[in-house]
Image (spheres, rainbow, N blue to C red):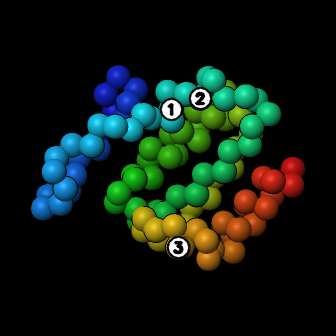
Amino acid sequence: MSVNGDLVLKKKKGGGKGTWNKSSSPHRWVDKIDKKTKVGIIIGELDENTFPKLSIDYFELLKKNNVQSELLLINVAHSFWHIYTNKEAIELGKSLVNK
């Protein structure tokens, strides 16, 4: 859910204490990103914590604003462990650093 450009994430039933409203949507800051910046986005397609659609929309907005960006979809849920051990994710990181 997005409210005035800021994300408002609702906690899942049975977890947490309600709404988390301390995050700012990265979509809101795209026009302030230096065009020399390289952005890598890695998405867990099964992620139910950070919905993939939000990251895909962000990627499309980056491209529209001529910010060099790469998108990688991994068939996993929400976990940094998968990113650190995924060969494609590691290669994406290396390619962004070495471009």
Above or below — where is 63 with respect to 79?
above
Residue identifier under label 1: 27
Q: Nearer the viewer, mark 3 or mark 2?
A: 3
Residue identifier under label 2: 30
* Cα separation between marks 1 and 3: 25 Å
User: Where is residue 66, by image quadrant?
Assistant: top right
Q: Nearer the viewer, mark 1 or mark 3?
A: 3
User: In this orientation, does residue 75 appear?
Assistant: no
Q: Looking at the image, tell me whether mark 3 or mark 2 is earlier in sequence order.
A: 2
Query: Where does the N terminus fall, quadrant-wise?
Result: top left
Front one among 2 and 53: 2
Q: x, y percentage for residue 24?
A: 42, 34
Element at badge 1? helix
* Cα separation between marks 2 and 1: 6 Å
The amino acid beneath tag 2 is Val
Left or right of 94? Residue 69 is left
Q: Are marks 2 and 1 in contact (CB under 8 Å)?
A: yes
The amino acid beneath tag 3 is Trp
